[in-house]
Amino acid sequence: MKLLSFRSYGHDTQDIVQLAQRIGCTTAEGLLQLVKYYYPDEQILPEKALEIRSIARQMNAPHKP
């Protein structure tokens, strides 16, 4: 549900990252599939899909020392 209703400011993004890492789902496709699985009747707006892809890129980016 957090993936459908999050705002890109505040703690929502941090919450998504923590939850995604906890369940081992850190790719954009994996996150989008979770939404489709649990909410098959919900439409994922293109803007929301872009934001989810951005979060996944951040999670998978190499960490700079």
Image (cartoon, rainbow, N blue to C red):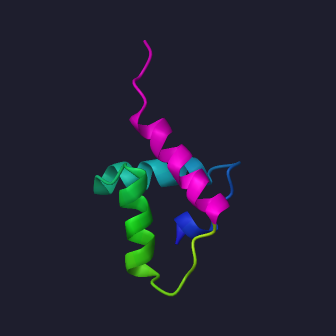
Q: Nearer the viewer, residue 63 or 53?
A: 53
Q: Please give the range of residues in magenta.
A: 46-65
Give the camera-side residue of 32 and 59.
32
Q: Residue at x 63, y 50 (%)?
A: 11
Q: Which residue is drawn at 44% across and 64% down?
A: 32
- Is residue 6 visible to us here? no
Task: Tell me the chief SS of the magenta region.
Answer: helix
Towards the viewer: 43 or 14: 43
x%, y% of residue 1?
52, 72
Instruction: Tell me the quarter of the image containing the C terminus.
Output: top left
- Is any atom of residue 45 visible in this view? yes
- Check the image and report above or below for 59 versus 29: above
Q: Does the magenta stretch include residue 56?
A: yes
Q: Quick one: which residue is furthest to the front in this view? A: 46
Numbered marks: total: 0
Q: Is residue 21 left or right of residue 55?
A: left
Residue 30 magenta-drawn? no
Q: Which residue lies furthest to the top in this view?
A: 65
Q: Answer with left or right where residue 22 lies relative to residue 10.
A: left
- Residue 19, position as x, y percentages in the image: 41, 55
Residue that protrudes farthest toward the left in the picture: 24
Q: In the rendering, at what x and y percent does residue 26 appear?
A: 37, 49
At x 54%, y 66%, the residue is 2
Using the image, determine if residue 30 lies above or below residue 14: below
At 41% across and 60% down in the image, what residue appears?
Answer: 31
